[in-house]
Image (tube, helix red, strand yellow):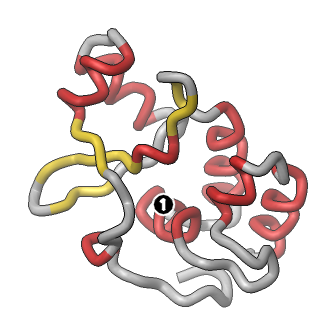
Amino acid sequence: MPGSWQSWYVTDAAETDWLTVPDLVEMLGQSPSRIRRLIDDRHLLAARIDGVLKVPSVFLRDDAPLPELYGTANVLADNGFTDAEALEWMLAEEDSLGTSPIAALLAGRKAEVRRVAQALA
């Protein structure tokens, strides 16, 4: 697995609220195929939990995918991360940021998060 961060199992993320594809269809007013396209194109990152594809609710803002997530997910992909690894990294505590990358993105620290992501290669 790329980088020096500690991996954890997304099924253990009890504090994370997860949304299913039907939840996202209702919330975003999009078709299931459009939701899957958002996931395939990395506008959202998802994990299979108990066999069900789910997206962390923190990846959405104002009922839309968090714009900063797309570029960050692509930086991670360019550095060899799978989408599952990128999702784990986004939710895990990152020592160099002093918080999780998603919390840093939500706080407006996009450039800093992407610098850290690039350094993980």
The residue nearer to you, when weighing 8 against 18, is 18
Q: Quadrant of the C terminus?
A: bottom right
Residue 56 pos. (x, y %): 40, 50
Measured from the top left, where is residue 60 in percent x and y?
51, 35
Q: Is residue 89 left or right of residue 71?
A: left
Relative height, residue 25 to residue 14 (above, below): above
Closer-to-camera residue (3/63): 63
Position of 25 with respect to 43 (left or right) is: left
Horizontal side of 30 relative to 107 (left or right) equals left
Q: In terms of depth relative to the viewer, which is nearer, 47 or 17?
A: 17
With respect to residue 2, does 72 lie above or below?
above
State the count of labels: 1
Which residue is found at the position 81% from the left and 66% from the top? 118
Q: Locate residue 101: give its quadrant.
A: bottom right
Does dot 1 land on a helix, a strand or a loop? Answer: helix
Query: Label 1 neighbourhood size at 10 Å, few (<14), some (14-19), many (20+)?
Result: many
At horizontal 33% and vertical 20% (from top left) the residue drawn is 27
Q: Position of residue 63 (x, y in %)?
A: 48, 22
Judge by depth and name the residue closer to the eye, 18 or 49. 18
Task: Name which residue type carries label 1.
Answer: Leu
Q: Position of residue 45 (x, y in %)?
A: 45, 47
Q: Residue at x 52, y 66 (%)?
A: 91
The relative height of residue 9 versus residue 103 in the rendered view (above or below) is below
Left or right: 9 in relation to 119: left
Q: Residue visible at 77% across and 51% down?
A: 107
Q: Which residue is mark 1?
A: 87
